[in-house]
Amino acid sequence: MMAANALRRVELIDGPTPLQRVPQLSNRIGVDIWLKRDDLTGTGLGGNKIRALEFLIGDALARDADCLITGGGPQSNWAMLAALVARRYGLDPYLVYYGLPRRPSGNHALAELAGADIRFTGNFERASVDSALEVLTAQLRAEGRRPYNLPRGGATALGAVGYAKANSELADQFRERDLTPQFVWLATGSCGTQAGLLAGARCLAATYGVVGVTVSRPAAECAHRVAVLTDEVTQLGFPASHGKDLDDVVIIDGYIGPGYGRASEAGEQATRIVAQTTGVFLDPVFGAKAMAALIDAARRGSIDGPVVFLVTGGAPTLFDTSEGQI
Ligand SMILES: *Cc1c(COP(=O)(O)O)cnc(C)c1O
């Protein structure tokens, strides 16, 4: 029935990632919390982008590409992991970063270890990457290469299929533990992860809500991107079950702090609480801010049931020494 089964995929994740009960954290904030450990997706230093890359690199190989082009900021988890996985499957990785060359740290340093050909746009606008990717793609094509071009964050419907499928993995884990979560809670950036989760949840007629905390875009823009991408994923083989209320794109705003890519005070506080109660390190750009929002919601009393918090990775940005410079 599912066209998604026909999609070519490379296998990067060895079995389901853990779903862990965290009683100390739950007691501390007064809500039953479970951590879905997608920081343990088993390639590089893990993270949510690996689920997308299983399908995106699969597609690049199916199309006989010989190089992969993508980009973002120098601290992009996506760009680093895309380069790493591309290399592993014999594709030459090209990365375009916004801004100016600087001393590599965090993901930028790891992308160099992965052997990525790295260029800078010379412009600090994030969107400067998008046109630079087009130019580079045309250039490589003119040289006789077969480039596969992916947007920032890998946020395409095909990439989001990784998270649409993750719902079945979650459903199995919920059944085993007799768990009925009220929400699956995550940080939203380029919106592919939330869209995939939502499409998969609709398809399975799941009873949990998918809540995204925006860390980079205005909530309205985010909601629009999630809605459009979710519909596209649905068409890739995840038809929504009948009777489901489709007014289910939920975005929480107010936790971006000083800006995308910059740590917030509330996020740092949340990171300390999580590290000291669970032994898990959240990243400052995504996970920290999503957890700050969850802690506030719990304190306000707006959560009743168990919450599954998606730990999305991003460990390399804990070692970013650029001190907020983007
Ligand atoms: C990319 C990323 C996210 C957000 O995922 P999107 O699909 O871009 O919305 C969350 N956490 C981490 C660590 C990420 O790298």
Image (cartoon, rainbow, N blue to C red):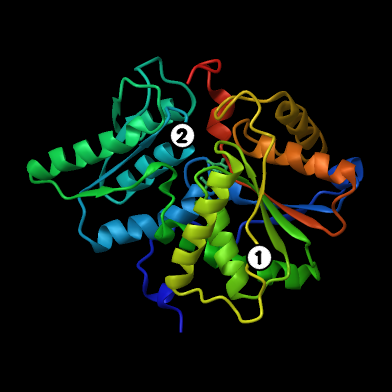
Q: Residue at x 68, y 35 (%)?
A: 289
Could one spot residue 39 in this view of the protein? Answer: yes
Q: What amino acid type is highlighted by mark number 2?
A: Ser
Query: Relative to residue 17, is residue 234 drawn left or right?
Result: left
Badge 1 is on which residue? 170
Q: From the viewer's perspective, is residue 101 above or below residue 264? A: above
Badge 2 is on which residue? 76
Query: Relative to residue 151, is residue 272 drawn left or right?
Result: right
Q: From the viewer's perspective, is residue 323 above or below residue 283? A: above
Q: Residue at x 58, y 46 (%)?
A: 220
Q: Is mark 2 within 8 Å of ligand 1?
A: yes
The residue lying toward the viewer, choosing from 131 and 262, is 131
The residue lying toward the viewer, choosing from 307 and 156, is 156
Given this view, does label 1 or label 2 mark the residue nearer the observer? 2
Q: How many marks?
A: 2
The residue lying toward the viewer, choosing from 199 and 221, is 221
Graded by Cα atoms within 10 Å as few (under 14), some (14 to 19) or many (20 or more), the crowding at tag 2 reads many
Query: Relative to residue 168, is residue 121 drawn left or right?
Result: left
Q: Residue at x 62, y 58 (%)?
A: 249
x then y, percent, for residue 120: 31, 24
Secondary structure at numbered mark 2:
loop
Q: What amino acid type is highlighted by mark number 1?
A: Leu
Dividing the picture into quarters, in which one does residue 265 lie?
top right
- The quarter of the rendering in which ligand 1 is drawn is top right
Graded by Cα atoms within 10 Å as few (under 14), some (14 to 19) or many (20 or more), the crowding at tag 1 reads some
